[in-house]
Amino acid sequence: MTEHCSAPELSTRTDAGVVTVHCTGELDLGTARRLRDRLLAPIRARARGVVADLTETTFCDSTVFSVLVEAHRDADALNVAFAIAPDDVAVARPLHILGLDELLPLHPGRAAAQAAVAEAWPEDRRIS
């Protein structure tokens, strides 16, 4: 039997100051550092907002969940809007089982996560 793994890909897009990190494939210990760097760099640079788009992620392990918690805490501390769009089975379900859905800002899809980040931006800091 041949095991088929979905190689992870991380891409970043910035639109109106909102950074979206799109992840596809399997995320684990081997990719956690890259994901951490992609999420924390714009948060620490005080981007308008950051979205972790995990809608095409096929597997996540606990190291990735730790990265999401760290990104959320850093974003909160720096007043940077942060949202996560998880895949229902590979990401949202394990987060729910672990109780992390109570802590993390999860949204049903990339568009909803991006809208949540845009709405969180204080009126006095919005770009006209």
Image (spheres, rainbow, N blue to C red):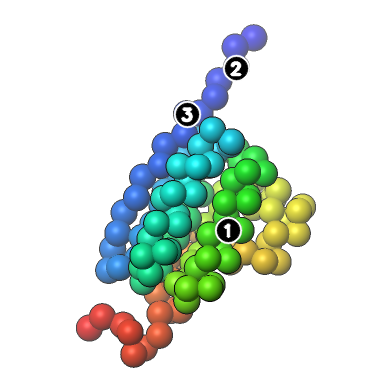
Residue type beneath disc 1? Glu
The amino acid pointed to by label 2 is Glu
| Residue occupying the point 40% across, 85% down | 122
Would residue 68 appear left or right of 121 to someone viewing this image? right
**At x 53% / y 59%, what residue is drawn?**
71
Q: Are marks 3 and 2 in contact (CB under 8 Å)?
A: no
Which mark is first along the chain, 2 or 1?
2
Of badges 1 and 2, nearer the viewer stands: 1
The amino acid pointed to by label 3 is: Ala
| Relative side of 60 to 24, left or right | right
Earlier-in-chain disc, 1 versus 3: 3
Res. 18 image quadrant: bottom left
Q: Is residue 89 above or below residue 78?
A: above
Q: Residue at x 76, y 53 (%)?
A: 98
9 vs 93, nearest the viewer: 9
Residue depicted at 45% across the width and 57% down the height: 40
Secondary structure type for disc 2 = loop
Which numbered mark, 3 or 2, is in the foreground of this view? Answer: 3
